[in-house]
Image (cartoon, rainbow, N blue to C red):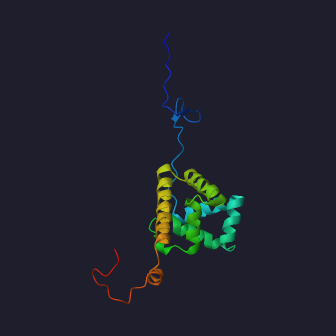
Amino acid sequence: MKMQTQRRLAPGATRYHEGMPGTVRSGRREAPATPSTDALAFKIFAAFRAHPHINNVLTHISQANWARVEQALNSIFDLTTKSDSLSQLGQNIIDLMCADRGVTGRILKPYFHAALHRLLLPEVAERIIRHVEILFLELEWKAQQPKPAALAQSDPPSQEPRHAGSEPQ
């Protein structure tokens, strides 16, 4: 009597019986195609609309103009976008996505990350997250820099010529 041996399955693989006997399908999910910037913006837009708190906050900061929210997301997810070209609404959305400030920031950041990881391959999701974080860091850096006009007002040049040795020591 000939003994039949069982084939070992790769870790995470499952056996299914729809095809030929013994056919193995990987347990990994099928790799989704990387969506266009427009498609990704719409999917995240829909995810934000589906969350009651995020929906309320974005309705408020966009003055109930959800077309502007979608445009801002489209700009944010475009990997060629620089922080200089973002609208005020886009800057506010990035702040909510990254800053961990307030209730909304603590809700939106993990929700946004989870939505990206649900929609995209991990490496694509991480690339988008890094891009958004870089935009945030650029905006934070610019906000901390004094304005040229503020510099001129706060430290006016002295009208008197300075002479060496005339300053108190």
Residue 132 at x, y = what percent? 50, 62
Position of residue 39 relative to residue 88, above or below, is: above
Lateral position of residue 108 relative to residue 10, left or right: right
Residue, far top = 1
Quarter of the image with the C terminus in it: bottom left
Position of residue 83 relative to residue 165, above or below, is: above
Residue 123 appears in the picture as rendered = yes
Residue, far bottom = 159
Residue 104 at x, y = what percent? 65, 60
Lateral position of residue 130 relative to residue 72, left or right: left
Viewer-nearest residue: 78 or 36: 78
Residue 71 appears in the picture as rendered = no
Viewer-nearest residue: 120 or 59: 59
Viewer-nearest residue: 131 or 6: 131
Identify the residue shown where x is 47% and y is 58%: 130
Location of residue 68 by image quarter: bottom right
Location of residue 113 by image quarter: bottom right
Residue, far left = 164
Residue 120 at x, y = what percent? 53, 53
Position of residue 13 relative to residue 100, above or below, is: above
Viewer-nearest residue: 163 or 17: 163
> How many numbered discs?
0
Identify the residue shown where x is 70% and y is 60%: 53
Identify the residue shown where x is 28% and y is 80%: 165
